[in-house]
Image: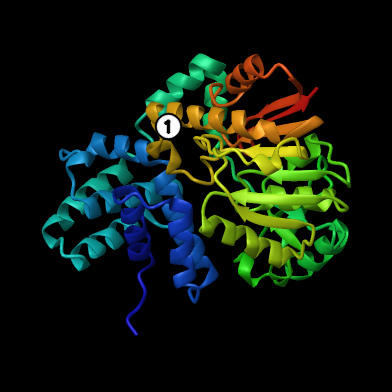
Amino acid sequence: MASINIREIAGDTLVEILEHGQFSHIYLKAVLDKYVYLEKNERAFITRLVNGVVERKLELDYIIDNYSKTKVKKMKPLIRTMMRMGVFEIYYMDGVPESATCNEYVKLAKKRGFAGLSGFVNGVLRHVARSKGEIAINDISVKYSLPQWIVDKWTEEYGKEQTENIAAGFFEHQDLCVRVNLAQITRDELKAKLEKQGITVRICDNLPSAMYLSGYDSLAAIPEFGQGLFYVQDYSSQLVAHMAQVKDTDSIIDVCAAPGGKALHFAELASKGQVVARDLTAAKVALINENIKRTGATNIQSQQWDATEFDESAALKYDIVVADLPCSGLGIIRKKPDIKYNQTEESLAELVDLQKQILDNVCQYVKVGGKLCYSTCTINKNENENQVTNFLASHKDFTIEEQMQLFPDVDHDGFYICVMKKN
C-alpha cells in the first residue's frame, strides 16, 4: 500500500472547501471518517492544518502577496492552496521545522504535476520563512481574516474595540461543550466514566447540564456517546431552555429543530410534558430521529413541516414555542470558519426577512401566558435586537422577559436569546 501523505489529504480537502464551496465542518469530518485508520497525531495534524488555513485565509494571502510576484488570485488553485498551507505551517505550527515544510511542499508540487512551479514554491516559502514576523499587520480585517464588510458592520454596531475582541475571540481555543443526559445519568457519574478513559473533563459552573471535554480522539470511540449519555451542545444553545424556565408539564414545539439538541433538552426538562420537533426536510427530520433514538427520549416526536406555513391545528396550543431560526451564523465562525467568506450583506437581508416571516407565523402557536423563545447563532443587530423590536411593534400582546447577546469567548460562541411572554 502506498504511503499516505497527510499534507496531500489536507490540500485536497482545502481545495474542496475554498475552491469548490464545500462546508468545512461537514467535509473535514467526512475526510477524517474516511481516514479513520490514521494515527491520532496524523488526524490532529490534518484538522489543525485545514481549519487553520480556512480561519486565516485573508492573512495568509496578504503575507504571500508580500513575497510573491504572482499574486494569490492569479495562482492555480492547487498551488494557491499549497502556498497557504506552507505559510500557515511556518507561522503557526512550531512543531514542524521550516526547512522540512518547504521541502514537503516542493515534493508535493512535483508529485501533483507542477514540477515547473516547484522552484517558485520553494523560493517564496523560503523567503517567507527567512522574513517571518517582519510584516506588521494592524488592519482588523487582515489580522483576523474577517471580510471588511463584517468588520465595518460590527464597528458600527459595537465600536472598534469590541469588534476586535469579537474577532480575537474566534481564535481562542475552545473545549468541546456537551450536555449531560440527566434523565439517564448524573453529571458526576458521567465525569468519572469519561476520566477513566483518559478524557479531560471540566464542569461548567453556570449550567447544571454542561461540561467541557478535551483529550479524546473521536466522539464515535466514546461508548457513553453512543449510549446517548451526553449530547454535543454548546453552552449558549443549552442556555435557551434554562432562560425559558421550563415547567415539567409544559407542552413545547421547536419549529426549526434539527439536529434536535434544544428540543431534546426541553424534553428532558418537561419530563411530564410533550415536545414536537419540526424541520423542513426529510433529511433534517431523520437527524432529529437519530438523536431521539440515541438519547432514549420518549416524550418527543418529530414532524416534517415548513415553519413559514401556518398550522391551524397548532394555534394557541403550546406553553413554549422555540424559534431557533435560520441565521447568518456569524457567531459560530470558530466552528464553521468558511461561513465568514460565504455570507454577504444581501444574504443577511434575505435572512432577516425569512426570520420575520417565521416569527409572525409561529407566534400564533403560543398559548396566552405562554412564551416565545427566539434565538440565533449570530452577532448582528438586524437579526437579533432589531428583529425583536420590529416584532414587538406589530405584536402588542408580547413583551420581553429576558434577552441576551453572547459574544465569543473560551466557553461559548456568539449567540442571541430572547424570551418573550404572551400576555
Q: Residue at x 88, y 53 (%)?
A: 272
Q: Nearer the viewer, residue 203 or 404?
A: 404
Task: Say whether residue 395 is left or right of residue 157.
Answer: right
Which percent across, then down, holds residue 198?
Answer: 73, 67
From this view, report whether residue 4 is shown above or below residue 265: below
Q: Residue at x 79, y 34 (%)?
A: 243
Can you say which quadrant of the picture contains the N terminus?
A: bottom left
Q: Nearer the viewer, residue 416 or 152?
A: 416
Q: Which image quadrant is residue 213 in?
A: bottom right
Q: Of the residues shown, which amino acid type is indicated by label 1?
A: Leu
Can you say which quadrant of the picture contains the C terminus?
A: top right
**Residue that lies at the very extreme toward the bottom in this rendered image:** 1
Q: Residue at x 83, y 42 (%)?
A: 205
Mark 1 neighbour class, 10 Å CA radius: few under 14, some 14 to 19, many 20 or more: many
Q: Residue at x 51, y 40 (%)?
A: 333
Q: How is the image coloured?
A: rainbow
Which percent across, then down, holds residue 241?
Answer: 77, 41
Which percent across, then down, holds residue 311?
Answer: 63, 41
The residue identified by callout 1 is 146
Q: Is residue 94 visible?
A: no
From this view, report whether residue 81 is shown above or below residue 297: above
Under circle 1, the secondary element is loop
Q: Which image quadrant is residue 214 in?
A: bottom right
